[in-house]
Image: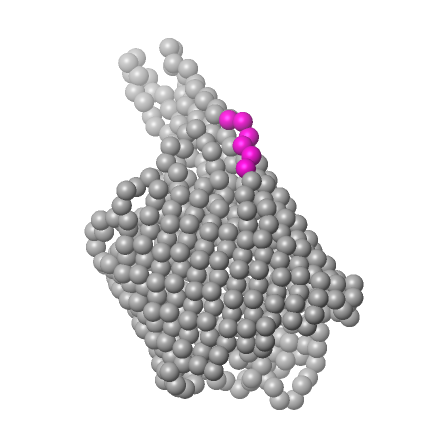
Amino acid sequence: MKFNSKLLLPALAVFSGNCQAFDWLFDPRFSATERYTDNLRMQINPTRDNLITTLSPGVLLGYMAENHALNANLNWNELIYHGESELDLSEKIANMNHQFTGERFKTDIAAQYAVQSSINTQLDLDGSGNLQVQVPRTTRSLAPSFTYNFTERNALQLSYNYVDVAFDRTEALANNLGYSDYDNQQLTATFFHTYSQQLTFNFSGEYSVFNSSNNSNTSQNLLLPDNSITNRSTGSKFEQQSTNFLYRGGLQYQYDEQTQLALSAGMRQTENHTSFLETVTFDPLPLGLNNVFNLVNPPATKASGHVFSANLNRKTEWGNFSVSAAQQLNPSSSGNQQQTTNFSGNLLYNLNERWSTALTASYLISEDTRTFVNNIIDNNRTLSTLTPSLRWRWTPEINLDLSYTYRQQDFSFLNDSAIGNNLQLQFSYQPQINRQVK
């Protein structure tokens, strides 16, 4: 796990003067975004278009010392959907990272707490692709790691990653597996060998446990023929647990100061355990009726697959470009794990000191790993995006960004595509302050 030094660059520039035991970081920022979309929910036949305003204040806090550093990012996104106020939401995202470097070892710990919009996250690698309703999503994560350098060339990293995701579902969405709560725990051991200044090899083994659940309960009073009243409760409970083993080898090659290449490939083995319980109970129990308990518990399923990743980054005098490809297993909100294959590319071209343009493209294939008899419709999908953009650096503190995004999503159980067009204008302000907290 790497410490995100990019976040500290503005503060480093501010506090590059007299070096003290601690350099305290304070970096506020603000952005305002207007976005127009003709298919917010990614429907095959959209019913309306939308204009969304997003107001985003944020601040970076922390400190830097000789051998340790801390930063905390606090962000607030106020989402305003004009004409559909029921979708309005206040996103709250807090990230923390601490790093300590000793003579032969390094520790790193990262944590996150986030309340986010499902409309903004369900198209991600860990989403189900369902954007029909707004469901607040709460994410909690913790990721510590420890790296020990045996020699200048050899090092071992041990890391743990815990993620917990919960949805604030309404009663109408209680049975919707597209908004299933889940948690994922992952243990990883990685060995690094530096062959030369340009070439580094790595070998890793990973064990993870994924748990997903979706519970619903409804009750109704019934009038019986003898004019007595009984309460009928109907419940359902879906659970899945998956254990995964992954083995991977890779390399990082720095051709020169401007060009970097990273490759890795490996195998994964997965075992899934799934159960589904339906209950119907009466209180009191009328004559002639019985409580119903229907448990579906199919045998465990096993599967294996490949994982790989490839990244190429190149910096030039006029800008930079990168291309990447990856296949991996992701925990997801669709009630199961998903194998995703993703291809992406990004090109940035600096027209002059103030103007720059960029082009980003991606193609995602998401496939279910679940085999369950009651799940007739799978969640396999593909998502294509293309985003050209233009940036104007108005002042050193203010940027204006104009972008257009084309999105196309296809589910395997449908014979048609959902297409969305998005136009976005963003104003961002980051004051160049000279402030050091004493």
| The residue positioned farthest toward the front in the image shown | 255
Residue 21: name its quadrant: bottom right
Q: Which of the two residues, 70 or 228, is positioned nearer the viewer here? A: 70
- Asked whether residue 41 is in view, the answer is no
The quadrant of the image that shows the C terminus is: bottom right
**Image label count:** 0
Does 337 lie within the magenta span? Answer: no
Q: 343 or 227: nearer the eye?
A: 343
Quarter that holds the N terminus? bottom right
From what the image shows, is residue 194 above or below residue 368? below
Q: At which x and y percent is residue 274?
A: 51, 32
18 or 205: nearer the viewer: 205
Farthest residue in the top direction? 288
Residue 262 on image: x %, y %: 57, 63
Asked if the stretch drawn in magenta spans residue 300, the answer is yes
117 w.r.t. 273: above or below: below
Q: Which residues are magenta?
A: 298-303
- Name the foreground residue: 48 vs 207: 207
**Image quadrant where residue 98 sits:** bottom right
